[in-house]
Image (tube, helix red, strand yellow):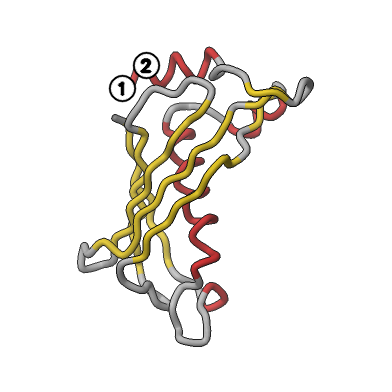
Amino acid sequence: MLENKTPLKIRYCETDQMGYAHHGNYAQYFEIGRLALLNDLGISYKKMEEEGVILPVYSLNTRFIKPAKFDDSLILRTILKEIPSTRITFEYEIYNSKNEKTCFGETVLVFVDTKKNRPIKIPQELFSKIIEKF
């Protein structure tokens, strides 16, 4: 299992009329976490794209437990529990400053060759780095 912990701070522009972090922002928070986890592995998503591999989101699931509010300091925990093949699954947990879980979710992304616009197996460089740290 691999994981990354990323701090988040809820900005005013991310809140709704109730003062809660709007649910639409959570997909962006999850993206921040998965890019941070890939960076921890020494993988640049930008470089992967330049080499012709993209990772479109196949599915996104989110469960809200407690609202996050303006100016809250949160910790986003991003987890990779299994070795990917053509798909990569990330799990997420968000905790507030009291260490209470406020949200959890999951995204499944697919490795796609940009030239053929077809799913492919995980690039060897990423596979090797995941295996090395798993």
- Residue 16 vs 5, above or below: the answer is below
What residue occupies the far right of the structure in this picture?
115
- Residue 11 vs 130, above or below: the answer is below
Residue at point 44%, 23% (across, down): 84
Residue at point 57%, 76% (across, down): 13
Q: Quadrant of the N terminus?
A: top left
Q: Quadrant of the C terminus?
A: top left
Q: Position of 71 compared to 46: left or right?
A: left
Type of amino acid under label 2: Ile
**Dots 1, 2 in contact, CB < 8 A:** yes
Task: Compute the Cα span from label 1 to label 2.
Answer: 5 Å
Residue at point 56%, 17% (across, down): 121
Give coordinates of residue 99: x percent, y percent.
Answer: 21, 62
Give coordinates of residue 119: x percent, y percent.
Answer: 64, 23
Read off the residue under disc 1: 134
Q: Residues within 10 Å of mark 2 (few under 14, many from 20)?
A: few
Q: Residue 131: give its label.
A: 2
SS for dot 2: helix
- Residue 57 vs 22, above or below: the answer is above
Query: Residue 19 lies in what quarter of the image?
Result: bottom left
